[in-house]
Amino acid sequence: MTARESLNIATASQPPWDGFNLGNHVGDDLADVLKHRAELAAALQAQPVWLQQVHGHRVVRLTQANAGALAETQADGVFTTEPGLVCAIMVADCLPILLVAPEGRGVAALHAGWRGLAGAGDLNGLGIADAGVAALCEATSSDPADLQVWLGPCIGPTAFQVGVDVLTGFGVDPTQDHHRFVRQSPDRWLADLAGLAADRLQSVGLKRIEGGQWCTVSEPSRFFSFRRDRVTGRQAACIWLDGA
């Protein structure tokens, strides 16, 4: 269910951004975006903090003291141990990863495109999932096995066509079969982004992993998709600790 469906709030944006766009960097009218963000905050009864996502592995801590200053910070993960603060990630094919520490000690939201997930290029192998789990565990004195994780909607395994750079980014030999990559031609594969994220999370010790079954590309009535439409809006995945 989309935010608009579940919260029963209206969309102000015009096509091609119609559908409750929350992204202020995609060409939509800023007044409409701000209206949507305000409606979402009212429905949640808390103000989401919006990052400037850059496909990296930086994770920032959200507190009551820095909530105002943190807006538009360049980062791809955010966590908090304080109630009433909304960690938010915008996506339109990339994978949102939401983490919960035991006993309500903390939550985190991560933005995982393939580069950030793999830790490709100048990230030197450190992916956003690795960094996010480590940050939340340190802040909450938790073990990775104690965390719960939810994988949100992303580009699905029948829609995400990739080249050899993606395989090598994940350390996969393109001459060998791999359960997360299905060869379509000599130089093209279909990749399972949610499955790759689950593998990565399991490799750092997580055991309770749910979600990941929704494809943004194949459900145009529910999700924005950059791969499908190119000019489009952004949906958000949000998580917070209840202040009640």
Image: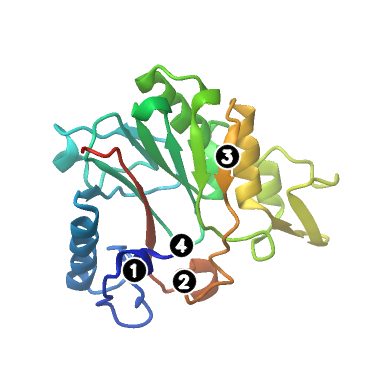
Mark 1 residue crowding within 10 angstroms, few (<14) / some (14–19) / many (20+): some
> In the image, is residue 137 above or below residue 95?
above
Q: CA distance from mark 1 to mark 2?
A: 9 Å
Specify the label residue 4 is tagged with: 1
Specify the label residue 222 is tagged with: 2
Specify the label residue 209 is tagged with: 3
Image position, residue 1 (x, y; %): 44, 64
> In the image, is residue 135 above or below residue 71?
above
Q: Residue at x 52, y 30 (%)?
A: 130
Q: Earlier in the sequence, mark 1 or mark 2?
A: 1
> In the image, is residue 57 above or below residue 160?
above
176 relative to 12 in the view: left or right: right
Pointer 3 and pointer 2: residues touching (CB < 8 Å)? no
Q: CA distance from mark 1 to mark 3?
A: 25 Å
51 relative to 237 in the view: left or right: left
Specify the label residue 95 is tagged with: none
Q: Secondary structure at mark 2?
A: loop
Question: What type is the residue that disc 2 sits on?
Answer: Arg
Q: Earlier in the sequence, mark 1 or mark 3?
A: 1
Q: Nearer the viewer, mark 2 or mark 4?
A: 2
Q: CA distance from mark 3 to mark 2?
A: 23 Å
Q: Judge by depth and name the residue closer to the eye, 199 or 113.
A: 199
Q: CA distance from mark 3 to mark 4?
A: 21 Å
Q: CA distance from mark 1 to mark 4?
A: 15 Å
Mark 3 residue crowding within 10 angstroms, few (<14) / some (14–19) / many (20+): some
Specify the label residue 92 is tagged with: 4
Mark 4 residue crowding within 10 angstroms, few (<14) / some (14–19) / many (20+): many
